[in-house]
Amino acid sequence: MQQTITIQNIDDIHRAAKDFLEIIGERRIIAFFGAMGVGKTTFTKAICEVLGTNDIVNSPTFSIVNEYDYADGNKIYHFDFYRLKNAEEAFDFGIDEYWNSNEFCLMEWSEKVEDILPDNCLKVCISENKNGTRNISFNIN
């Protein structure tokens, strides 16, 4: 079933992240798609904050993956695939081990690895509307 959450403005982002987490349930592998500047990192940061991390959340553009702690030692892995030349590079740093960890894997620039995403991956599109609001769209099967 198609789901869409609209973020009215930056002050509304934590409400949207909370709604998103409630809707997705136990899903942990999340691939974000969207144009540069649409808010992938900002929404990821809001998700991490709603989950309760005290770590500083920023884009892992140069490190490819950042790790954040939340709730009783659980982990959030935040990926930015922008710098990958091809999907095979993701296997070089052990992406499949992260995916099999049962921890949150929040991935930006997922277009770079779309061909290798696992079947249990939730694909999420973030788009900007003409009035500046953002839509978070995804299918829950």
Image: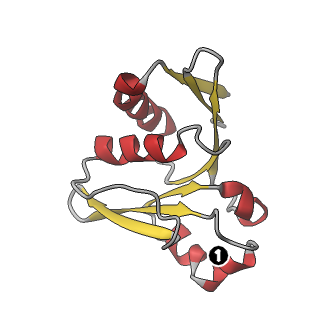
Residue 16 horizontal/vertical position (percent): 43, 28
Q: Residue at x 74, y 72 (%)?
A: 87
Task: Tell me the kind of residue under disc 1.
Answer: Ala
Q: In the depicted view, which residue is nearer to us: 98 or 8?
A: 8
The answer to whether residue 134 is above or below residue 71 is above
Mark 1 Cα-neighbour bin, 10 Å: few <14, some 14–19, many ≥20: some
Residue 74 horizontal/vertical position (percent): 30, 62
Residue extending furthest right?
A: 115
Quarter the C terminus occupies: top right
Q: Which residue is drawn at 53% across and 39% down?
A: 39
Quarter of the image where one finds residue 1: top right
Looking at the rendered structure, the number of numbered marks drawn on it comes to 1
In the picture, measured across the screen, residue 76 lies left or right of residue 134, that is left
Q: In the depicted view, which residue is nearer to us: 116 or 81?
A: 81
In the picture, measured across the screen, residue 60 lies left or right of residue 130, that is left
Residue extending furthest bottom?
A: 92
Q: Is mark 1 on a helix, strand or loop?
A: helix
Residue 113 horizontal/vertical position (percent): 71, 64
Coloration of the structure image: secondary structure
The answer to whether residue 135 is above or below residue 91 is above
Quarter of the image where one finds residue 120: bottom right
What residue would you read off at disc 1?
90
